[in-house]
Image (cartoon, coloured by chain):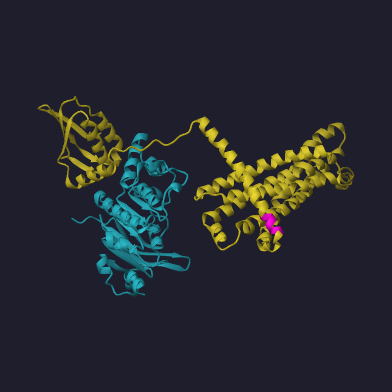
Chain colours: A yellow, B cyan
Amino acid sequence: MTSFIRSELKNGRTTLLLQGEWNIAHLTELRSSSHGIQIAGGQDILIDCRQLGAMDTCGASQLLALKRRLSGSHSVQVSNLPQNFKQLVSLVEERLGTQKLPEARSLSLIQSLGLSSSKIFVLVTSLIAFIGETAFGVLSLIKRPSLFRWREFAMQLKVACVDAVPISALVTFLIGIVVAYLSSIQIEKFGANIFIVDAVSLALARELSPIIVAVVVAGRSGSAFTAQLGTMKLNEEIDAITTIGLSPQQVLVLPRLFALMIAMPLLVFVGDVAGTLGSMLIAKTSLGITPTTYLDRLQAVLPVRSFMVGLVKAPVFAAFIAVIGCKMGMSVENNARSVGLHTTSTVVQSIVAVILLNAAFAVIFVELGI
Amino acid sequence: MSEAPVLEISDVHTSFGLNKIHKGVSFEVEKGTIVALIGGSGSGKSVLLRAIIGLLEADQGSIKLFGTDITGISEQGFNRLRNRFGVLFQNGALFSALSVAENVAVPLKEQMELAEDAVSDVVALRLALSGLPLDAGTKMPSELSGGMRKRAALARALALEPELLFLDEPTSGLDPINARAFDQLIRTLARALKITVLIITHDLDTIEGIVDRVLVLDQGKIIADGPPAEVSKVSHPWIQEYFTSRVQTKNG
């Protein structure tokens, strides 16, 4: 390795002869040779650039750093710096000077915990505010029904409901199979084969189908709402809607809200049917219960009330998913990354909200004796 | 002493489907010059830039960067060239998940083996050279104004001391004061750092202010080439309209 600095002591004066290419390709070596220069105090120092092969801005800033460091305890002179490098050095000196890059702010564990907790608080309060705004939007819609956007509503209904049928059916069908299979193993031990219908149909209608469909809808429609509205926000389309004299609330939020509230119960019904088909399949293959027997038993043991419980929960879940999705979309900040972050957050918030609501429903229904 | 041109384009053809964009574009860019490429909207300036920096393959013709033909070059071979040029994209193309300082550090960390403190020194140098206060380094790109974003993007483009700099509409979206300051910055850096610059622009002030040579792209070909004062006298309807556009609106 060639040395970039050669030090010569002559008549009580040190000459530092700079050699080689002082550029970014050799920055690491340059820095170590430069740091290696230690000169006893009181001497005059001459930095001689006669043999400097090449220099770029990184080399220039190394030269300046060296000069500055030595100037603390010595009188330093730079000589023979070629004209074109001189320009470079003076540009770097003028622009950079002695500035250092400030440390990036980094948070301690406690600080980030506190920060994310306070963010949850802000999130919840702003969600409550948005629910309030949406409620006012609904009120003004009731006063003037002509405001309703039928086209947008129909489009959203198609996307949120019709297009979601296959995936909802598939997922609940598989859940039906799994639950029926696990129950059948236990039930078979008691020889109480027919009770598979009681167990699976109740679980499906009251809990599994609404929850599973809500998760699918949160992932499909909730995230789509955030991505759509977020992109519109980014593109100033929402501001344009306001400027044209329309209410983004009426044009964007309410059609999505109502579409999802109608779509969800329908999807839950699809889920009930698909889950039942799945468990029928297992009942037939594992326990020898024919579909006819299964349906007979289903009619006898599944109260309509339990079936209705599932359908009543669905629009409430849907309302929260839609409101969260729209709110997160409308609150996207002015950068593309924010759209992604908000979309993820929508799915997480929606699923948490659905589980909380489901727990609340369970308590309410028990208290009401339903 | 005449050195080999930094960029040599000969007979380049590109197309999107049946739509022919370039029908034989040829020009050279000499080392150390500031060259502007102008042309109407949709004349294929940006497409040509994408072809030069290897984001798009030309149908026909050759593009030589630093004397190396990039048509049909291996990815590895092209990567060596990539370290020698920098690109300032139109909207900055700063990575939104990273702070400004981290943005500038990306090429340094990925392409060079430097210690952490060396990287931060080079980042500070780049930010300072681009005319940014160093505390802007801790900000996120979304927190910057348009002018600062361009400067941050320039700092990243300059990170590896490129010999050649491509600027796509560097002054678009800036107010005239910021735009002229940015022009001046480019000229100062190009002169002091001996960088060759190819600017794609619509900005007449940039052309008259800092450019050595203008290339005019129209109908898929270069129709004029020379110093701004000469090109403005070429009798071609688009060129005449372009160079007199300011006067026309004033009198119109």
Can you see residue A2? Answer: no
Can you see residue A273? Answer: yes
Instruction: Report how many numbered discs are placed on residues in the image.
Output: 0
The residue that appears at 74% across and 45% down in the rendered structure is A210
The correct choice, above or below, for B213 with respect to A177 in the image is: below
- The one of A277 and A58 positioned closer to us in this rendering: A58
- The one of A358 and B160 positioned closer to us in this rendering: A358
Task: From the image, give the main secondary structure of the stretch colored magenta.
Answer: helix
Q: Residue B51, how many percent across, how many down?
A: 39, 58
Horizontal arrangement in the rendering, residue A19 relative to residue A248 (left or right) = left
Q: Residue B110, how many percent across, how many down?
A: 40, 41
- The one of A167 and A356 positioned closer to us in this rendering: A356
The residue that appears at 70% across and 40% down in the rendered structure is A355
Horizontal arrangement in the rendering, residue B100 relative to residue A124 (left or right) = left
Q: Residue A13, how many percent across, how many down?
A: 13, 29
Of all residues, the one furthest to the top in this rendering is A40
The correct choice, above or below, for A310 with respect to B36 in the image is: above
Horizontal arrangement in the rendering, residue A141 relative to residue B170 (left or right) = right
Q: Split into 4 quadrants, where in the image is the C terminus of chain B?
A: bottom left
Tell me if residue A370 is in the magenta stretch. Answer: no
Quadrant in which residue A179 is drawn? top right
Q: Split into 4 quadrants, where in the image is the N terminus of chain B?
A: bottom left
Q: Residue B13, how many percent across, how many down?
A: 39, 65
The correct choice, above or below, for B145 with respect to A44 in the image is: below
Quadrant in which residue A56 is drawn? top left
Image: magenta residue range: A137-142
Quadrant in which residue B213 is drawn? bottom left
Horizontal arrangement in the rendering, residue B164 relative to residue A368 (left or right) = left
